[in-house]
């Protein structure tokens, strides 16, 4: 008995499933890469600029550091007081394969703050 027709049908059914799975993996990788980059850059910026938090040009300094790392600063928010700085940054990254299921872009967001606790700088995620 010839089973070539059954193999072709199974192939036609399984290929789209593999393509969708591959698309999901690629988009998830893009989201994780951008989220990790945003978080690590924000932590570095908080550590390196904490001492300058009371200067008049603090916002511009933080913004330049983000731009130097190719991270958008359109929605950046900085809140600070005497011993704490909180940075919130979010941007949207275009989806490559998410368009198939109706997602045109993904939201990448971080909220981190740094505190001075007994002379030690502590970074917390909100």
Image: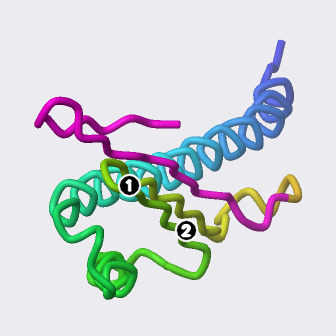
For numbered disc 1, what is the local secondary structure?
Answer: strand
Instruction: Point out residue 79 in the picture as x, y percentages from the top left corner.
Output: 49, 61
Question: For mark 1, does the 10 Å Cα neighbourhood hold few (<14), some (14 to 19), or many (20 or more) residues?
Answer: many
Residue at point 59%, 44% (across, down)? 22
Residue 7 lies left or right of residue 52; in this view the side is right
Report which residue position mark 1 lands on: 85
Instruction: Point out residue 117 in the picture as x, y percentages from the top left corner.
Output: 23, 32
| Image quadrant assignment for residue 77 | bottom right
Residue in the foreground of this view, choosing between 14 and 96: 96
Question: Quick one: quadrant of the N terminus?
Answer: top right
Q: Nearer the viewer, mark 1 or mark 2?
A: 1
Does residue 65 show up magenta in the picture? Answer: no
Residue at point 55%, 42% (across, down)? 25
Tag of residue 13: none
Instruction: Point out residue 70 in the picture as x, y percentages from the top left corner.
Output: 36, 79
Eyeballing the image, is 118 above or below 64? above
Eyeballing the image, is 78 above or below 82? below
Does residue 116 show up magenta in the picture? Answer: yes
Q: Which residues are magenta?
A: 103-126
Residue 86 lies left or right of residue 93; in this view the side is left
Majority secondary structure in the magenta region: strand
Residue in the foreground of this view, choosing between 93 and 112: 112
Eyeballing the image, is 76 above or below 36? below
The colour scheme used to paint the residues is rainbow
Report which residue position mark 2 lands on: 77
């Amino acid at each position: 008995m010839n089973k070539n027709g059954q193999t072709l049908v199974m192939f036609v059914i399984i290929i789209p499933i593999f393509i969708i799975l591959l698309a999901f993996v690629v988009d998830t990788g893009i989201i994780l890469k951008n989220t990790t980059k945003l978080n690590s850059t924000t932590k570095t910026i908080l550590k390196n600029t904490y001492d300058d938090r009371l200067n008049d040009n603090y916002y511009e300094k933080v913004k330049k550091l983000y731009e130097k790392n190719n991270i958008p600063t359109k929605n950046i928010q900085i809140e600070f007081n005497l011993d704490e700085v909180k940075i919130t940054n979010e941007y949207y990254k275009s989806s490559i394969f998410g368009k198939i299921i109706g997602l045109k872009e993904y939201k990448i967001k971080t909220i981190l703050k740094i505190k001075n606790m007994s002379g030690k700088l502590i970074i917390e995620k909100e």
